[in-house]
Amino acid sequence: EDQVTQSPEALRLQEGESSSLNCSYTVSGLRGLFWYRQDPGKGPEFLFTLYSAGEEKEKERLKATLTKKESFLHITAPKPEDSATYLCAVRDSNYQLIWGAGTKLIIKP
Amino acid sequence: NAGVMQNPRHLVRRRGQEARLRCSPMKGHSHVYWYRQLPEEGLKFMVYLQKENIIDESGMPKERFSAEFPKEGPSILRIQQVVRGDSAAYFCASSRYGTGLNNEQFFGPGTRLTVL
């Protein structure tokens, strides 16, 4: 069965303290792995798409990497405005997205 | 270029009433997806539509729920005879393409349904 697991469920960091969020997956025929950011009361905001192992993408303080079993979202020197829930989703050999439950990130000033 | 629009943002219904949720996709997007999200839980796929066609409704409850995406106008998610368990945030997303590369889904702000 296709599955996406994100860890940790929640992560508290001090401003400037770098860390990584994990998204591990089992899927038949990966057709892309997606990272989104969701703020309270809002819809998910698209961040990155990764298609093949070894691929990396960066945006400001965020960097996403992909292996055959998992993806990491690295956050370098985070700021309080990076606080949000980060969602990971994989697309299987059909078109459906299978979503993880998210990691709630809190950056304290 | 306006993003995905959903209305209403908040909807309160009493048990047994009908709820209609609307979604206008981004300009140039012809693929629409509806998701449901409960507090502290991930997104659950409900239905995938293209103009005038339901492509996949495997995530939709068999009873009381229906969706459409007419040739003109927004996509509608309709919930008949609502029950308290229907209370959730309902998100709509759209994409330019349905499959293949460059088919990222972009989300609207959601409709928060509360059933009293």
Image: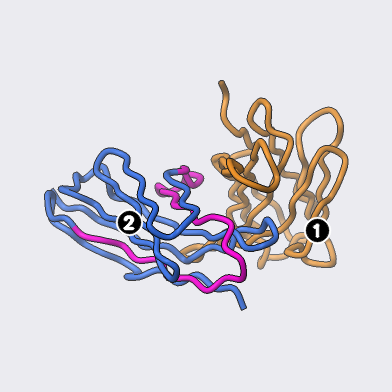
Identify the secondary structure beneath mark 1. Answer: strand
**Residue position for label 2:** A73
Residue A46 vs residue A69, the one in the foreground: A69
Which three-letter amino acid code belongs to the residue tagged 2? Leu
Residue A88 in the image: state x and y as whole percent.
46, 59
Residue type indicated by callout 1: Phe
Which stretch is magenta? A19-46
- Which quarter of the image is occupied by the C terminus of chain B? bottom right
SS assignment at label 2: strand
Residue A58 falls in which quadrant of the image? top left
Asked if residue B103 shows in the view, the reply is yes
Asked whether residue A30 is drawn in magenta, I would say yes
Color used for chain B?
A: orange
What chain does badge 2 belong to?
A
Q: Is residue B85 left or right of residue B104?
A: right
Q: Position of residue B35 (x, y in %)?
A: 64, 54
